[in-house]
Image (tube, rainbow, N blue to C red):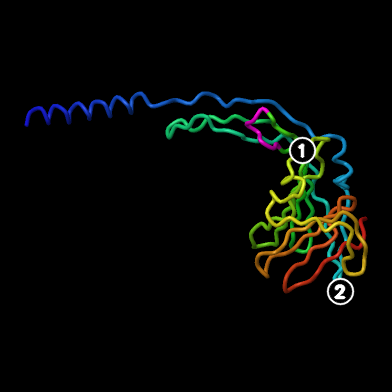
Amino acid sequence: MKPVLILLAGLSLIGLTSCLEETTCGADVRLGAFNLTNAYQTYFPYGGTEELVFVDGNGNELRMESKSLKDSVQRLIVRNPCFSPSTGSQDEYYDIQTITQTFTGGGFTLKIYIQPDLINPTSPDTIVVDQLLITLRKSGTEVLTGPNFIVSDRGNDLPSVYKNQDYYERVRMIGDTTLAGREYTEVYTVDRVYDEEPQIYYSLNRGVVGMDIPFEAFWQLDRIE
């Protein structure tokens, strides 16, 4: 019986030693930085002073005023090589330029982001692209995500799945289309999963051109002031 007690005591000591020797993660590692190319202006037709005027089928107007245009640096984390419950994780990351345009009006907050993104970020074959993201929020509701897609491949030869935009779930390139009697070119949208989801339409040369809010109205861009 004594050998068993000795063994148990030994295991307890080992466990205590392991706790005392818990790994401490080092500082975060910055791998580099990426800025947007000048080409982003082709797909981001906002300068921070516009007012978007939408109309519904009854001629009612929804005015959305530009609240801010921010040019900032965000951290894009690509790997966590170390994690410690007591000291937290160590991140490997890139600094990426992010431009955010915010519009508000009629109880809605519309945000359009454009920033670099990385395909295969931990591989030697990393590809840099520019992507655009949209979110819409109505007062008192959750944030609703709109189109999220590549607007510039920066001249890179992308894998076929990325060329088709299939890697972003439900994103659909409509191309040239007519919305409520008006023609638009190079339009993207996100297909609904639930009937109560809004649907946002984004034209590469005009920005947000339509917001289909279920059980309320289809707001179509009438003009930019």
State whether residue 67 is above or below residue 22: below
Residue at x 76%, y 49% (from the top left corner): 164
Task: Report the residue marked by disc 2.
Answer: 57
Instruction: Give SS at disc 1.
Output: strand
Q: How many marks?
A: 2
Q: Tell me where residue 143 appears, x and y as whole percent.
A: 66, 57
Q: Earlier in the sequence, mark 1 or mark 2?
A: 2
State whether residue 5 is above or below residue 195: above
Residue at x 76%, y 39% (from the top left corner): 158
Q: Quadrant of residue 157?
A: top right
The amino acid on which the numbered mark 1 sits, given as a three-letter code, is Val
Residue at the outermost bottom position: 58
Instruction: Give SS at disc 2.
Output: loop
State whether residue 23 is above or below residue 109: above
Q: Tell me where residue 105 appears, x and y as whole percent.
A: 79, 60
Other-residue count near label 2 (Cα within 10 Å), few / some / many at <14 / 14–19 / ≥20: few
Q: Tell me where residue 216 appears, x and y as whole percent.
A: 75, 72
Residue at x 75%, y 54% (from the top left corner): 147
Q: Whole-Å distance between the Cαs marked 1 and 2? A: 38 Å
Q: If the image is split into quadrants, where does the C terminus sit?
A: bottom right
The amino acid on which the numbered mark 2 sits, given as a three-letter code, is Gly
First to last magenta residue range: 118-124
Task: Report the residue marked by disc 1.
Answer: 129
Residue at the outermost left position: 1
Front position in the image: 86 or 140: 86
Residue 133 drawn in magenta:
no
Front position in the image: 21 or 10: 10
Q: Main secondary structure of the magenta part?
A: loop
